[in-house]
Amino acid sequence: MSEKIVFLGTGTPILNLEREGPAIAIQTENNIYLFDAGRGVVRRLVQSKLPWKEITNIFLTHLHSDHTVGLTDFIYTTGVVGRFNPLKIYGPSGTIDMISHLKQAFSEDVRIRVEGLERGKERAYQITPHEVSQEKQWPEYFYKDSEISVSAFPVLHGDWECFGYRIETKDNVIVLSGDTAPTSSLIEASRGCDVLIHEVYYALGFSKLENPWNYFPTHHTSGIELGEIAAEVQPRILAFNHQLFCDGSKEDITKEIRQNFTGKVISAQDLDVIELE
Ligand SMILES: [Zn+2]
Ligand SMILES: [Zn+2]
């Protein structure tokens, strides 16, 4: 079976029924890995028909709520309906605290499910958090199994720690930007990759906003900047997600990217699949 990237959510905190919060699944021959767990991730996993019961590894780029609110749903809903394996969750500083608070918040729910007549599986709620900042960073791997190796590199998202991930499968290199303004760490870690999945905002639309936040240019990447990055990285496929439209469209953002990059560009939508050879 070929490798697949499934875009479960391509949105942002902005509520949009067609775009759930950021989440991506990478499926290899025998495994499935989840990257970020935004709003709606469980619904999208079901719609995608991926074998979500098998997920055991979750990688968070950072702890902004748009990337993490679906984690609670994933842990505490799927744990009731057929996901039986313990989870390992990788993320930035603060991940250990976040998981510890989640466990505390749901401790009574888990106790009643496990000890009561439901006979819930305690294993499903065993979660081991790992903080990537304490692990080896790119070009070394912090995670490796028989199907993928993952390295992390810090990106530029304000004061809060955020990581991009470089995933090497048997035949492909996939890079996820996380949320970031342009940064050389991403360019170095993604040069020549097969698929670069990168966040973006529409620069022209942003410039016309009545009260534009300075937040966008300092924490995110415009379509024009993304084209410049892609021209340097030269990925086989550039897929953009986490799209901040600023009253524009995916075509508007694509046009901005096209000012500098002539390769293959995909504006990712929820449930889009990239099949890799
Ligand atoms: Zn963010
Ligand atoms: Zn975000």
Image (cartoon, helix red, strand yellow):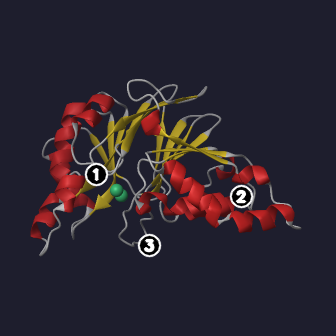
Q: Earlier in the sequence, mark 1 or mark 3?
A: 3
Q: Disc 1 vs disc 2: Cβ atoms closer than 8 Å?
A: no
In percent of width and height, residue 160 lies at: 33, 51
Q: Is residue 87 left or right of residue 277?
A: right
Label 2, on which residue?
Answer: 79
Q: Disc 2 vs disc 3: Cβ atoms closer than 8 Å?
A: no
In percent of width and height, residue 191 lies at: 29, 28
Label 1, on which residue?
Answer: 159
Q: Earlier in the sequence, mark 2 or mark 3?
A: 3
Q: Nearer the viewer, residue 240 or 222?
A: 222
From where the camera sits, is residue 262 visible?
A: no
- Residues at marks 1 and 2, CA–CA distance in whole angstroms: 34 Å
In percent of width and height, residue 133 lies at: 42, 38
Q: Secondary structure at mark 2?
A: loop
| Of the two numbered discs 1 and 3 in the rendering, the one whose residue sits closer to the viewer | 1
Q: Is residue 144 left or right of residue 20?
A: right
Q: Earlier in the sequence, mark 1 or mark 2?
A: 2
Quarter of the rendering occupied by the N terminus: top right
Instruction: Identify residue type, mark 3.
Output: Leu
